[in-house]
Image (spheres, grey):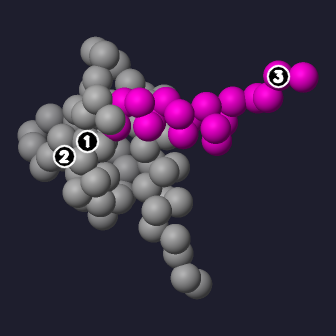
Amino acid sequence: MDIDEDKIDDAVLALLWLTLHDESRAWKSFDWEAMDRLHGKGLIADPVNGSKSLILTDQGLQRSEELFRALFARQMR
């Protein structure tokens, strides 16, 4: 199967918004390769540290919320 890694990254970023705490921190319990790609795109700070959470950049916070709403919010009728 050919996997679209950008779609995986979008889903992971959206789910990071779900676990957001302390304004810009989220739990880093997702695939490490996806986390590395998000870091490479400038959406999160370097996830390789001793902390159980990571920091989303300003751009990452904005995009994370947009993706969460697009993927998981119910549409108003």
Indicate which label's residue lies in the foreground, 3 or 2. 3
Q: Label 2, secondary structure: give it.
A: loop
Q: Amino acid at mark 2?
A: Pro
Residue highlighted by disc 3: 76
Residue highlighted by disc 1: 44
In the drawing, what numbered circle is on residue 1?
none
Q: Position of residue 29 (x, y in %)?
A: 35, 45
In the drawing, what numbered circle is on residue 47?
2
In the picture, the quarter occupied by the C terminus is top right
Residue with the most extreme left position: 50
Q: Position of residue 55 (x, y in %)?
A: 23, 32
> Taking 33 as reference, is 67 left or right?
right
Task: Mark 1 or mark 3: name the one nearer the start of the chain.
Answer: 1
Q: How many C-alpha atoms fall within 10 Å of the one at disc 2: few (<14), some, or many (≥20)?
A: some
Residue with the most extreme bottom position: 1
Q: Position of residue 28 (x, y in %)?
A: 30, 41
Q: Are marks 2 and 1 in contact (CB under 8 Å)?
A: yes
Q: Are marks 1 and 3 in contact (CB under 8 Å)?
A: no
Q: Label 3, secondary structure: give it.
A: loop
Q: Which residue is found at the position 48% from the left and 51% from the top? A: 10
**Overall secondary structure of the magenta stretch?**
helix
**Quick check: 12 above or below 16?**
below
